[in-house]
Image: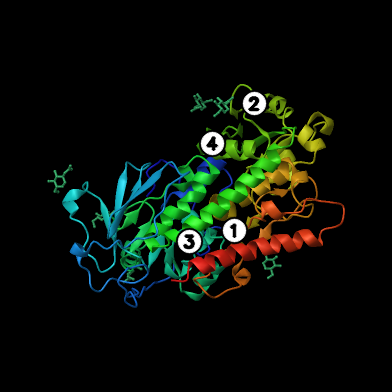
Amino acid sequence: MAAQSIPIPPTNSGKAPRWTQPVSFYGQSVFSKYYAQSICVFLLLVPFLISPTAAQGQGAIGGQNCVTNYDAAANVDYFPSKITVDDAALFKVRYANNYKVVTNTYKGNKDYVLYQCGTTPPATSEFANGTIFVSVPVKAVASLTTTSVAYIEMLGRRSALKVVDTEGLVSSPCVQLGLEKGEIVGLEDKNQTLRADQFKGADLVFGAAENGTETKSVSTSEVSDPGPLNRAEWLEFYSTFFNLEESAQKLTASINNNYNCFKDRANAKPTKPVVAWSSYVAPSIYNNNTATWMFSSAPYKQILTTDAGATLFNGTTKETFSNSAEFLADLKKVDVIIDETFTGSDMTSFLTSYQLTAANTADYKFLQNKAVFRQDGLVNPNDGRDWFGGAVAMADATLQDVIRATHPEVLPKDVKYNWLRNIAKENEPKQLLNSANCTTTDSSTPIPDRAITCSTMKVDDGKGSAANKAIAGSALTAIVGLLAAALVF
Ligand SMILES: *[C@@H]1O[C@H](CO)[C@@H](O)[C@H](O)[C@H]1NC(C)=O
Ligand SMILES: *[C@@H]1O[C@H](CO)[C@@H](O)[C@H](O)[C@H]1NC(C)=O
Ligand SMILES: *[C@@H]1O[C@H](CO)[C@@H](O)[C@H](O)[C@H]1NC(C)=O
Ligand SMILES: *[C@@H]1O[C@H](CO)[C@@H](O)[C@H](O)[C@H]1NC(C)=O
Ligand SMILES: *[C@@H]1O[C@H](CO)[C@@H](O)[C@H](O)[C@H]1NC(C)=O
Ligand SMILES: *[C@@H]1O[C@H](CO)[C@@H](O)[C@H](O)[C@H]1NC(C)=O
């Protein structure tokens, strides 16, 4: 159960997929919390069995293998690859010879002691009550959030993913396929006995503790870490549980370099368009039955905006409006809108919800500019948005999308959108991700970052687009190659 008081989404009649519609009356922030936190929704699902995977193989140094000849006195460093936390603000890691202490500093400095499989864990008396001890690498995990799923897949550990909650909203094609085949199961919500059974097979559960998971639940806080690069670095947090520090460090270094290159290119432009991340929330019991409009200034949106060479607009006087005229007066100052409204998906519904139907187009720069973007550019068949999955981890690709809204001239002319689609210009369609889009059955293949390589991209030179496409393709290949190399043990 989520600790915060988040409204419980309505239930349907109990058939999977549990939702066919997004929960339209919540604000974006509520909905992203919904994705990121575990929430009890009460529906019924598939029976489930995990066969706990025994650690295979032997090896003195650990890595992916259990240690078979542990001798504490020998002073062996079982974790030669260590992460250093450079950007993330909400976790830290300390290494000892045969264990590491990972701390979530956002959730009350909660410690997780990860000891190499086959070695003797340190004494519990050395740690605070409630410290979680986990033998690593873990082989079977449950994920209560769709965001965690993206991190696990980027590390190439879909093979370890056995249970997911809110599975109807998972955007990953291969996890959708795994759910169809029964290799991964959706977490039971109604039958507490079955739910507890599902947890029994997992070495650990990413998400808040509940009955039966108190000793193996790991709170993750990537969506609370303020900046895009902070959030990307949570790849390293996840990697510690799989002993994948080396590949995670390479991956985040590559994301950071690419991100900073995009940031430099966009900020070399003298103009700073004004961007609003805004939304309409229909009247409901959650907003006192009053229609509201709002500007969001969540830190990661602020940073993405400035790093995209733009200025964040969050309201001259306030962020939340119940008076549409006041909101519209502010909107006149905005060049680019990132519309976070859950209802509707096209320009007609946008104009209606913002009460712009009768507006003089000339009064609104974003209408003149044809610059209205939505975050549902990559969705599953239930409108489960990858914006809350891949976009959280792939900071460089997310910035690329924002730059496409603020300074498209910095990018190759035909660069494809990922999450942010423009509904004002060409009504760019939602790109559907379903199980048929899973192109590899190898559950150890990391899913690639969606960014193009900034340093080698060819910005439109008037000579057409084929070259740019080739570069985008090779960037993905390069990143997959990098990870593949790092994953060879
Ligand atoms: C930790 O747990 C033990 C045993 O349950 C208890 O005696 C002790 O007071 C607890 N310590 C703290 C700091 O809560
Ligand atoms: C709940 O799940 C358990 C374990 O799978 C099963 O034995 C039991 O019949 C289920 N209860 C209901 C009411 O379906
Ligand atoms: C947790 O377990 C206890 C005892 O088994 C039970 O009384 C309680 O209702 C459970 N809570 C939830 C949320 O299932
Ligand atoms: C909700 O609306 C009622 C009636 O207009 C008002 O008295 C009340 O203060 C409002 N509550 C909030 C939290 O805005
Ligand atoms: C806009 O965001 C800044 C930074 O978070 C904040 O200090 C300011 O109060 C916000 N403006 C409004 C009108 O809320
Ligand atoms: C998913 O696969 C279909 C073909 O099965 C393809 O047309 C579509 O572009 C793919 N979607 C994405 C987002 O790659």
Q: Name the residue under label 3.
A: 247
From the viewer's side, name the closer residue of 85 and 181. Answer: 85
Q: Looking at the picture, which amino acid does disc 4 mark? A: Pro
Tag on residue 323?
Answer: 2
Query: Would you say residue 26 is visible in this rendering?
Result: no
Whole-angstrom CA distance, mark 3 to mark 4, is 28 Å
Q: Nearer the viewer's eye, disc 4 or disc 2?
A: 4
Taking 190 as reference, is 376 above or below it?
above
Query: Amino acid under label 1?
Result: Asp
Which amino acid lies under the numbered mark 3 shown in the image of this protein? Ser
Badges 2 and 1: C-beta atoms under 8 Å apart? no
Q: Image check: 319 left or right of 310?
A: left
Secondary structure type for disc 2: loop
Q: Quadrant of residue 303?
A: top right
Q: Answer few, some or many: residues within 10 Å of disc 2's Cα (few below 14, many 20 plus, some between 14 and 19).
A: few
Question: Where's the C terminus, which quadrant?
Answer: bottom left
Q: Which one is closest to the eye, mark 2 or mark 1?
A: 1
- The residue located at (52%, 75%) in the rendering is 442
Q: Is the residue 318 above or below the residue 191 in the image?
A: above
